[in-house]
Image (tube, rainbow, N blue to C red):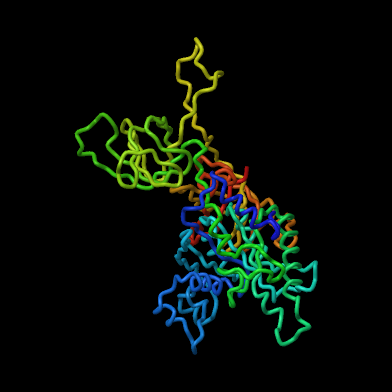
Amino acid sequence: MNTINTVAASLEDTRATSQNDHQSALKFITCGSVDDGKSTLIGRLLLDSKSVLQDQLAHVSRSGETDLAQFTDGLSAEREQGITIDVAWRYFNTAERKFIIGDAPGHEQYTRNMVTAASSADAAVVLVDATKLQWQNPDLALLPQTRRHSLLCNLLRVPSIVFAVNKLDALEDPAKPETAGQATLGFNNIRGALEKFAEHAGIEVATIVPISALKGHNVVDEVPGWCGYNGPSLLDILELLPVTPADTGLAFAFPVQWVEKFSSSADTSQGRRIFWGRVANGVAQVGQQIKVLPSGQTATVAQVLGTTRQPTAVQAGHSAGIVLDREVDVSRGDWLLALTAPAPSAIVSDDDFGDTPSATSLRPSREISATVAWMDDEPLVAGRVYWALHGHRWVKARVKRVVHRLEINTLAEENADTLGANSIGHIELLLQEPIAALPFAQSRVLGSLVLVDTASHRTAGAVLVNG
């Protein structure tokens, strides 16, 4: 983990690392406990980076003062209650980079919305409200929602996690000289607690920075020496964080989302349908031999189209249209998986009939061991059947058993028969049909499923396949 004394040097090293992408738009979320200042922080970023129009500024001003949280809290219920309910996305850019920000709600009731936002984020800024903690105590306890959101970001493979300790300016009163130095003491103690928690939970933290979202300290502009911190501002850190790398090093895998038919074509030298979707793993390129899941049919990629319908190879994370060398029955929800060369032991012998089955790089399985973030008010119970969505394919899934539940405060794995709303636990699933899954640690797409209640059709859980 980077300490505040080495943050600047580490970020400069990161800037020079060629394999990291610091030019593409960074998609990040703000998360943490309720009223930690997430919406205010985003408002400050937008305002101080001069990304707010005059009419927008006038709209959120009250009695001559700007209510920064109003830049993101757009629902009437959010404005009435002064809370964030849904994820609000905002866009801004600096001279160095473009950004997409997601303001995730802090209430435990809306953890499911935070999970949705974090699942596609490149970075997460976890806010910590210094005024809610026993900042005078070196062994202070963090808030449960701070721990929960940090754990979820780590489980969801968010590449960069930044802790921003907010409201430190409230610990010192300029009118009371005896309070001098309290902000530095508070930041040091909170930083120590965050480092202990991150080490215990196995969370790799990019950095920990002291900020005041209300006053703007260390958000866009640096305040050297404040709280004993002499590193870059939060915006400077965000400008240097890498985006999520595409899983191009894995074998080709492609979930079919839409089938475009042009059967009136007279060209029968190849298939007359285009299979559209987003490449999950590897690279879509002409000549790739594939196998269709679940039908098991094989074919060769005859043509690959980009989003502009021009022939080109397409890497993971980008949309593509694939035409096969012959007509094959492929529908929405099917997967196109790369074929692997047969092992030497599988070479046909004299007494074989030459029907050695072709194998894919992924072995389909009906049994899944996984970590689940449960989001439904109706608890997860062993034996219940849910719809599972993998890519664009729906299969029935039965919960074989609940292995354990993760206790947020102690990180202990407790025995459990059920998982309640906003719980994190380890479960075993039995699927009605096999799917080609990889551990989530290897592939975000192939390693994730969504469980949906068969009766209410509510999204019930986010499933991350274990190794």
> Looking at this rendering, what residue extends furthest in the bottom direction?
63
- Residue 223 pos. (x, y %): 63, 71
- The answer to which image quadrant residue 58 occupies is bottom left
**Observer-nearest residue: 417 or 317?**
317
Side of 210 where 361 appears, left or right: left
Q: How many marks?
A: 0
**Observer-nearest residue: 154 or 93?**
93
Asked whether residue 294 is in view, the answer is no
Q: Is residue 322 above or below residue 62?
A: above
Q: Is residue 336 above or below residue 426?
A: above
Tell me the residue at 62%/64% (across/down): 126
- The answer to which image quadrant residue 36 occupies is bottom right
**Observer-nearest residue: 49 or 128?**
49
- Residue 351 pos. (x, y %): 50, 11
Image quarter where the C terminus lies is top right
Tell me the residue at 37%/44% (across/down): 320
Image quarter where the N terminus lies is bottom right
Asked whether residue 284 is in view, the answer is yes
> Looking at this rendering, what residue extends furthest in the front direction?
224
Side of 91 where 258 appears, left or right: left
**Observer-nearest residue: 334 or 59?**
59
> Looking at this rendering, what residue extends furthest in the top direction?
350
Tell me the residue at 33%/37% (across/down): 323
- Residue 100 pos. (x, y %): 47, 62
Tell me the residue at 45%/36% (across/down): 337
- Residue 255 pos. (x, y %): 43, 44
